């Protein structure tokens, strides 16, 4: 479920960026009283995402819109499909058009690529995670698209999980020191916060196991063969995550190792927006 407060803030900021002191193209030639209808047309095959966002955008400008959904988030779409129809002031439709399309095209592209990755994991116990490699100020919707595509949201930001990565460990002095300090921090400052630690070698894995006090071990840039060895060392005591150098072509070999999670930034930053269009029609007076 999307955080509604964050969603409204995102929508208001995006509308303000686009509209500024007024939609002068519309104001100059269309009476304010003109009512209209718009339909969202699908022009490319993929997975639909962003229906909830579209409703919220229109309602932010005009609460009394009439919105008819013909499809839902997560549905497979094909050229010629109609996802929804909205009836509102023409001024509302034209103010919202670009933000609705930008959001849904981007989200549908991410959901489509995510679904392809998830399908590669079929028959395994491994689950796909996203990362923080997102577009600034658009993370809320990009991660929602990942969820719609069938993957799992990793931490949303720096605040909802401790992840001790290479730089944290190097700045701290050692992997043992970083873990101990993070554990003490959680006990005294943020009880319940989970700790994940990145390992760069099998020796790192052994050192982490000797310290304990964590929830998940990231196996960064490990080969599938190294992951199999690492999982034997870990012995199911902690959750495991494979990351780095994993793509659509080799993800199946990583999942075959039995690792719990695979994280991929590619499902967001390499996704291509789908082609959608919003066509407005004037209602009979």
Image (cartoon, grey):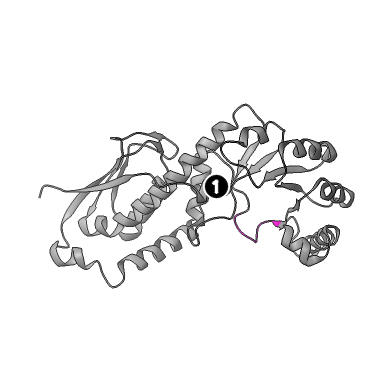
Q: Residue furthest bottom?
A: 21
Side of 35 where 234 appears, left or right: right
Side of 82 where 201 appears, left or right: right
Q: Residue furthest top?
A: 123
Residue drawn at x 79%, y 48% is 201
Give the percent coordinates (x, y) of residue 90. Answer: 20, 56
Above/below status of 141 relative to 249: below
Residue drawn at x 79%, y 61% is 182
Give the percent coordinates (x, y) of residue 11. Answer: 40, 60
Above/below status of 210 relative to 48: below
Q: Secondary structure at mark 1?
A: helix
| Res 93 → quadrant | bottom left
Q: Is residue 161 magenta?
A: yes
Residue drawn at x 73%, y 48% is 218
Side of 252 where 29 appears, left or right: left
Side of 20 where 110 appears, left or right: right
Res 247 seen here: yes
Q: Main secondary structure of the magenta part?
A: loop
Give the percent coordinates (x, y) of residue 40. Answer: 29, 44
Res 1 seen here: no
Q: Which residues are magenta?
A: 156-162
Q: Which residue is mark 1?
A: 266
Above/below status of 96 relative to 236: below
Residue drawn at x 28%, y 60% is 95
Depth check: give the residue in front, 48 or 225. 225
Q: Is residue 58 magenta?
A: no
Depth check: give the residue in front, 183 or 227. 227
């Amino acid at each position: 479920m999307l955080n509604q407060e964050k969603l409204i803030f995102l929508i208001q900021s995006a509308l303000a960026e686009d509209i500024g002191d007024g939609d002068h193209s519309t104001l100059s030639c269309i009476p304010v009283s003109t009512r209209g209808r718009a339909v969202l047309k699908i022009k490319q095959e993929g997975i639909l995402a962003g229906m909830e966002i579209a409703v919220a955008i229109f309602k932010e400008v005009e609460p009394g819109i009439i919105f008819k959904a013909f499809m839902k988030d997560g549905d497979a779409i094909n050229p010629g499909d109609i996802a929804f129809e909205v009836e509102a002031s023409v001024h509302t439709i034209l103010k919202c058009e670009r933000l609705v399309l930008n959001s849904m095209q981007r989200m549908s592209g991410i959901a489509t690529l995510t679904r392809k990755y998830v399908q590669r994991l079929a028959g395994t116990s491994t689950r796909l995670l996203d990362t923080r490699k997102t577009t600034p100020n658009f993370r809320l919707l990009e991660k929602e698209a990942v969820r719609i595509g069938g993957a799992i949201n990793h931490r949303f930001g720096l605040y909802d999980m401790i992840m001790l990565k290479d730089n944290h460990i190097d700045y701290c002095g050692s992997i043992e020191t970083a873990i101990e300090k993070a554990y003490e921090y959680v006990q005294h400052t943020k009880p319940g916060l989970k700790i994940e630690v990145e390992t760069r070698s099998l020796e790192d894995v052994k050192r982490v196991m000797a310290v304990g006090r964590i929830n998940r071990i990231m196996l960064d840039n490990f080969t599938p063969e190294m992951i199999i060895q690492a999982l034997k060392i870990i012995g199911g005591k902690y959750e495991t995550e494979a990351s780095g150098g994993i793509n659509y072509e080799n993800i199946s070999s990583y999942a075959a190792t039995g690792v719990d999670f695979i994280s991929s930034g590619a499902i967001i930053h390499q996704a291509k927006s789908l082609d959608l269009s919003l066509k407005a029609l004037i209602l009979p007076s």
